[in-house]
Amino acid sequence: MSTLPTKTVTETKAVPYQPRIVGYGHPGYCVPFVFGPPDDFGHPLAEEKRKLGLPPWATAWSEAQVHHFEIEGERRDVVQTCERYVKLLEKLVSDLDRSGLLPLSPSPS
């Protein structure tokens, strides 16, 4: 773990809405609808979708907040960093238990 100052960074990310397609009959009949020419050429939302990093097929989207730690100028995912920290703590406790350095606690009567 770093002892350097750490900053939490929150950014908003566009997430495409993907409706769940329920099939009826042959799978060939379960085709999602695509509106407009390929890649939305000339469509007013095309540039906006490109800026948001959305795929051309996205017709609806929502926003989600993504959190990062910024350590030494490098962004690191909060969930992965915390998972790593918890694993290190679990290993520390396990190693301490196996070391015999702690006195045995009396058993409950």
Image (spheres, grey):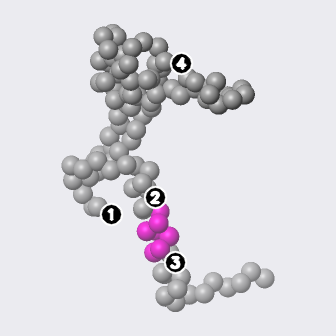
Instruction: Identify the mark nearer the N-term, 4 or 2.
Output: 4
Q: Element under label 4?
A: loop
Residue 71 relative to residue 40: left or right: left
The image shows residue 29 at horizontal and vertical percentages of 64, 24
The Cα–Cα distance between marks 1 and 4, rounded to whole angstroms, is 49 Å
The residue at 49%/88% (across/down) is 99
Residue 6 is covered by the magenta coloring: no
Return the residue found at the far left. Answer: 73
The image shows residue 68 at horizontal and vertical percentages of 35, 45
The local crowd at label 2, few if under 14, some if 14 to 19, many if 20 or more residues have their Cα within 10 Å, is few
Residue 1: image tag: 1
Looking at the picture, which amino acid does disc 1 mark?
Answer: Met
Return the residue found at the far right. Answer: 109
Instruction: Identify the mark nearer the N-term, 1 or 3.
Output: 1
The local crowd at label 4, few if under 14, some if 14 to 19, many if 20 or more residues have their Cα within 10 Å, is few
Q: Which residue corresponds to mark 3?
A: 94
Q: Quadrant of the C terminus?
A: bottom right
Q: Element under label 2?
A: helix
